[in-house]
Image (tube, helix red, strand yellow):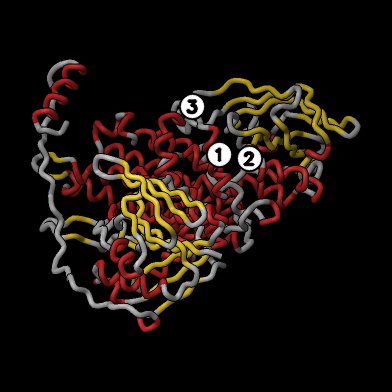
């Protein structure tokens, strides 16, 4: 079991309070696609977002394990908020790959000024195959001219910029670079917003680039060597998604347990039936195992170890656990499990998102095997 | 610099106390927390300190368990903390708690105001503030819903059963505030980290002049069960159902 310091536990308690007092009353709005603008501001004011950044860039230098514990608390109630609750998606990447000049330029905006930045890697012909992209960036004086499109871009409503991968060279040596692209640049257009099964608070859809002029300083990392940077972002994102799986599963189980302790059939609480007890035992054990795996990898991250394999393992396992647990939770609650107002069916829908986003379960298994066979 | 002392209690989270079949209470899964009402009390003290350009001091009388309350309280905006670490706190009645707090207050210089909650969220006995005021020989104001300080004058609005009463006292004094006095903000994470660097003074019973012998001892604690009406209004339109519900409330004398 992960052991936390007194300070870490206080932070987790604050997250729990925030979730119950501020987030839960707003979940119906979030589910309707109206993500409250002030929610991100409040999270930023309390210090959740960017908590892992160095103090000089507005962070608290907190550990990944604290971040994970807080993600779980948010995911127990709402997936959309859990993903953005305490990590500006590009901030750790900027720490690792941005020049000092870029840090000075970007951090005031993305830490103090409450701007969020998202990720735009997937294209209609390049999803799991991140290297198969067709978006191009061509140098023109001090700028780059970006053309192409991204799809399945999440948080289009909350983010003011996106880290975008683009082909900058056709040679076999890399050839992909990553750019931080502001959404309000001329030529950037938001396309269709997809109606999807879960994660309703995040607008997910298309982003088009038509002769977008991007200043050279917005190229993050080394020209033509953006793919390792994309993969590093994915490692961290996969770990967070894994913990979202743990949180969704735990939240669903807790709701189902509360129900079966009250619901009576044949003159008994249905929690007294062996079939239900077996479900609960299996669900609780699987969740504990998934949580232990996530913390194991998070501790590796905090100890500066390579987490590509671990993050893939954690995300594959936890997202599959979330699917199994939420399905059983709905089953335990019978008809009520299907009712929107009861609040459990959302967990089932959201869980399905997890085994696809940031790498499908099948791709993750390829990653795990590839790393093991090295 | 003038000091405002806020007294708070480290209590078991009532939401996690379970009821056994024999109506006894199961505390095994209950974690400790700062009494919900004391969060507002602490916020009232922080705001009062801003008004008089003073500093805030947290003061708690508790067992060794209460040590865990200190950083939590400090993260809510207090400048320093005093903790009376006494096993006697586990069976203290209002007289003992007031005596211990008064003993500790004598160790803190330049106290201009003591802020307590009207009643702790576990017992809600409402005894400590009046007893503390009496021991200090300071004016005491209870049921405070609003608080203003100007110079040496404290003005409080007391929320009574059917009226609001405005009273004035000259500092120093003791006030017992209602939770509605403010909306206590959640502490920021930076405040949590800063809390560990603030000064904390631990006092043992031997360090203070206090009578820690309870006059009232609790012999048992049992839950009482609410009997429910189990009334279900099934017939009629939504309007008719609401009308039937309101009629029922009238019959029961609830409205």
Which one is earlier in the sequence, the residue at label 1 or at label 2?
1
| Distance (Cα) linking label 3 and label 2 | 20 Å
Same chain shared by disc 3 and disc 1: yes
What is the chain letter for disc 2?
A: A
The quarter of the picture where residue A146 lies is top right
The residue carrying mark 3 is: A33
**Where B213 falls versus A98 (above or below)?**
below
Q: Position of residue A117 (x, y in %)?
A: 65, 38
Task: Say if A148 sits above or below A45 in the image.
Answer: above
State the residue at coordinates (51%, 66%). B80
SS at mark 1 in the image? helix
Task: Give the mark nearer the N terminus: 3 vs 1.
Answer: 3
- Marks 1 & 2, CB-CB < 8 Å contact: yes
Disc 1 target residue: A40
- Which chain does the numbered disc 3 sit on? A
Q: Quadrant of the C terminus of chain B?
A: top left
- Disc 2 crowd, CA 10 A, few/some/many (<14, 14-19, 20+): some
Identify the residue under disc 2.
Answer: A114
Q: Is residue A285 visible?
A: no
């Amino acid at each position: 079991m992960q052991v936390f310091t007194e300070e870490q536990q206080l932070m987790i308690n604050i997250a729990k309070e925030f979730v119950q007092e501020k987030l839960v009353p707003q979940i119906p709005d979030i589910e309707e696609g109206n993500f409250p603008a002030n929610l991100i501001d409040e999270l930023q004011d309390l210090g959740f977002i960017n908590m892992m950044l160095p103090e000089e860039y507005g962070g608290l230098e907190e550990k990944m394990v604290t971040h994970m514990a807080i993600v779980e608390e948010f995911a127990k109630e709402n997936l959309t908020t859990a993903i953005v609750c305490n990590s500006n998606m590009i901030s750790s990447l900027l720490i690792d790959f941005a020049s000092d000049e870029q840090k000075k330029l970007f951090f005031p905006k993305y830490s103090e000024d409450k701007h969020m930045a998202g990720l735009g890697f997937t294209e209609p012909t390049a999803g799991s195959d991140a290297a198969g992209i067709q978006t191009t960036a061509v140098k023109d004086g001090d700028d780059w001219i970006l053309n192409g499109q991204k799809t399945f871009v999440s948080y289009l409503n909350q983010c003011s910029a996106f880290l975008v991968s683009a082909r900058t060279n056709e040679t076999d040596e890399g050839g992909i670079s990553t750019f931080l692209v502001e959404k309000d640049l001329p030529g950037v257009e938001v396309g269709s917003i997809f109606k999807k099964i879960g994660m309703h608070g995040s607008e997910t859809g298309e982003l088009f680039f038509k002769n977008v002029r991007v200043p050279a300083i917005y190229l993050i990392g080394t020209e033509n060597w953006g793919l390792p940077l994309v993969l590093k972002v994915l490692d961290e994102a996969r770990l967070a998604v894994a913990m979202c799986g743990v949180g969704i599963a735990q939240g669903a189980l807790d709701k189902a347990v509360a129900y079966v302790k009250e619901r009576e059939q044949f003159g008994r609480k249905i929690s007294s039936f062996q079939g239900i007890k077996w479900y609960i035992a299996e669900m609780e054990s699987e969740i504990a195992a998934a949580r232990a795996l996530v913390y194991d990898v998070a501790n590796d991250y905090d100890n500066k170890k390579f987490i590509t394999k671990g993050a893939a393992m954690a995300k594959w396992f936890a997202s599959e656990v979330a699917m199994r647990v939420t399905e059983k939770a709905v089953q335990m609650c019978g008809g009520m499990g299907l009712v929107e107002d009861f609040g459990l069916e959302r967990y089932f829908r959201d869980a399905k998102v997890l085994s696809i986003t940031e790498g499908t379960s099948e791709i993750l298994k390829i990653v795990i095997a590839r790393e093991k066979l090295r | 610099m003038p000091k405002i002392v806020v007294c708070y209690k480290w209590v078991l989270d009532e939401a996690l106390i379970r009821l056994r079949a024999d109506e006894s209470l199961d505390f095994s899964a209950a974690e400790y927390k700062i009494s919900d009402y004391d969060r507002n009390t602490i916020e009232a003290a922080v705001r009062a300190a801003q008004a008089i350009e003073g500093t805030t001091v947290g003061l708690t009388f508790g067992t060794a368990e209460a040590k865990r309350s200190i950083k939590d309280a400090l993260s809510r905006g207090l400048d320093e903390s005093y903790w009376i670490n006494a096993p006697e706190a586990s069976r203290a009645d209002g007289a003992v708690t007031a005596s211990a707090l008064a003993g500790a207050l004598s160790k803190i210089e330049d106290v201009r105001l003591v802020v307590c909650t009207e009643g702790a969220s576990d017992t809600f006995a409402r005894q400590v503030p009046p007893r503390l005021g009496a021991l200090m020989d300071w004016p005491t104001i209870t049921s405070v819903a609003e608080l203003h300080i100007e110079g040496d004058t404290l003005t409080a609005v007391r929320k009574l059963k059917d009226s609001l009463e405005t009273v004035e006292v000259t500092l120093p004094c003791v006030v017992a505030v209602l939770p509605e006095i403010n909306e206590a903000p959640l502490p920021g994470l930076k405040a949590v980290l800063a809390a560990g660097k603030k000064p904390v003074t631990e006092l043992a019973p031997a360090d203070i002049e206090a009578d820690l012998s309870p006059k009232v001892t609790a012999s048992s604690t049992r839950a009482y069960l609410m009997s429910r009406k189990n009334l279900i209004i099934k017939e009629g339109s939504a309007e008719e159902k609401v009308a039937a519900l309101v009629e029922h409330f009238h019959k029961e004398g609830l409205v």
